[in-house]
Amino acid sequence: MGIAYFEAERIFRLDTKNTSYVIGIVDKEGFVGHVYYGKRLKEADLSYLMRIAEGPRTPETNGRDRLSFYDTFPQEYPTHGIGDFRESAVRIEDANGHSAMKLTYAGHEIKKGKQPLAGLPATWGENSETLELTLKDEVLDIQVVLSYSIFEDVDAVIRSARIVNCSKETIYLTKAMSASFDMDNHDYDKIVLHGSWARERHIERTPVSYGLQGSRSLRGEGGHQEHAFTAVLEPAAGQNSGEVYGMDLVYSGNFRSLIERSQFDSLRVMTGIHPEDFRWELCPEAAFQTPEAVLVYSSEGLGGMSRCFHDLYRNHLIRGSYRDKKRPILINNWEATYFDFNTEKLLGIAREASKLGIEMLVMDDGWFGNRFDDNRALGDWEVNEEKLAGGLKYLVDEVNKLGMKFGIWFEPEMISPDSDLYRAHPDWALQIPGRTAGLARNQYVLDISREEVADYVFEKVAKVLRSANVEYVKWDMNRPLADVASAALPKERQGEIFHRYVLGVYRMQERLITEFPYLLLENCSGGGARFDAGMLYYSPQIWCSDDADAIERLTIQEGTALMYPLSTMGAHVSDCPNHTVGRVTPFETRGHVALAGTFGYELDVTKISEEERNQIPEQVAMYHKYNDLVRTGDYYRIASYRENHTHDCYMVVAKDKSEALVTFIQVARRANVHSRNIKLLGLAPEKTYRIEGEERTYLGSTLMNAGILVQEAWGDYKSRLYHVVEA
Ligand code: DGJ
């Protein structure tokens, strides 16, 4: 690993273990271009890749065609208004109302390590190096510092940009993307993740077409519908081979990730905060820091890319005591009781759950104010002692006496019109003066961009947490942002609210994990609308989806695991018929599917059948047996139900290749067929393995090249685990 500047060639080369990212400076004006990203290279003299010897060449040698140069040159951080008519990465409004910018090389520094970003989530870790490349607009006196970091142990490049106003005039930033790079198109495909509530992160793969395409959110969070992750890949690339470029954003608000295919068949790939609804005042000497973008190149297909994202997020993004720890098996009362619960009912669930080996009771929505349904009381974070007779401490102590931990639900960013908080502070809700703000789930969004509002709510939440031995928090958010205006900002700064809101959420969550470092924090947003890398900096796990049906989850979890580690995916065994789709699946299958995530229960354990209840101790034992492997191992996808409509199969292999767990789900039973041949992945070819429960042994190479035979089970929705252990 290392970052080098080759002065004679005017080339920067960032080498991770298997990849190189190359940037070049050309022309006497010092234009900074993207040269190469891909498999590791050894040469420095690569500037020919920027095609500066071909027409239109550079302004130095062909001043009459400057615009043609701008419109073809692979600018590393493209600007607006001077003749590059493709998508720009940065845009300003200067003191005269103009938006043109020209950035050229002004200097660079190569530093050991990686700096945190004030107020923003960021990857971290020793054994890293950072290139800070400073570009400048000479006319406006504005600097852009592009930051590139690499780590010794992962093939990722982490980028961000800092825009500094060195002039004496106030300017407005109207676009500040985190990363952009250009490359030649090779008939590439693209992958985006689309969805809806209860149907998050479904993979869609289509050819890259001309013009603009990609994904975006203007909801103030990532949302159920689209995701900032994008991949560009060779048409032949599959799970195990082929070139893939993956890009993700470490951010939890409005985003735009795009691919633009130009007239000359080059691609511009870009991600960052969505420029719509973004306008940031930059006074003289002020700076704006963008969130981080993560770039991953894999020559080992999508699987190689996923494993790289997983390692990066596990080792260099997630923090806190639970990062490397097995999480307690929880039982959440949401689908068990909805709002209809009291102390006795919860204790009844806890008593039964504790006998079965479940380790934590999570009390979901409905414990505060007069919240007997979802129409009221958000903001009134006082325990409702009519419901919780004896108070919170009594309940928690009783749960603790059973040997279980206790967790609680909050939705700190929201306010119900029917709440004491709204009656006292109606101006704390996001709303545009003179316009009636729209409700969603009968609630408004609090103006978390205001420090006094965020501080008030934080104190209310903290007071509850200080009052009893609460060891887990589920932080929910059940509607997007609309009618966005803040009573605390002048009119020329209203365009800052969306980003300031996200910064406010980050500040609150940072305070939470600082004051309560032992807490297990699980983020959530109406299911998985805020499952993003930004949130992982604060919480090691995120609720994946409100749809806990084992079959629907196959597609949701496949899309989520494309870049997020299994250790982060909130997954529970829930009741049947499933509350979202009405499907009935075997209890065993529900357990196997939830095992690929954090694992827990979301049902009334006192009401399910004896037969199902009797399976829980076995499932608990299964979780304890496999969770270390699932949490820390390498993930390989073998088959996708989304593609084949009959079965799903994936495996996790220990880093030292000593064991693996294969999960096979037969979604639809076929008639009159032979057993299915499944080729395993990621094992050591020369090691000898045994499949638990079988006598014989196999070489790893046999299991991977010849495969195992999976007999068709009787009926649909059946699943099977194969534990492969070194013999
Ligand atoms: C949405 C979450 O995803 C659910 O699990 C539950 O906590 C509800 N909100 C409660 O209102």
Image (cartoon, rainbow, N blue to C red):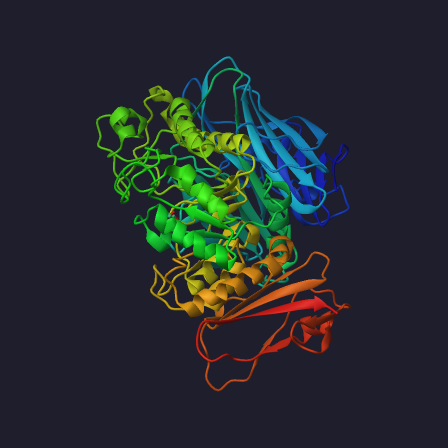
Q: Quadrant of the C terminus?
A: bottom right
Expressed as whole percent of the image width and height from the top left, the position of residue 59 reads 60, 32
User: Can I make out residue 630 in this image?
Assistant: yes
| Residue at x 70%, y 27% (from the top left corner) | 109
Residue most toward the top?
168
Q: Nearer the viewer, residue 145 or 517?
A: 517
Give the number of marks.
0
The quadrant in which residue 36 appears is top right
Q: Quadrant of the N terminus?
A: top right
Expressed as whole percent of the image width and height from the top left, the position of residue 548 reads 42, 58
The quadrant in which residue 60 appears is top right
User: Can I make out residue 475 in this image?
Assistant: no
Expressed as whole percent of the image width and height from the top left, the position of residue 279 reads 41, 27
In the image, taking residue 380 as reference, residue 27 lies left or right, namely right
Q: Nearer the viewer, residue 6 or 413?
A: 413
- Asked if residue 569 is positioned above or below residue 120 in the image, the reply reads below
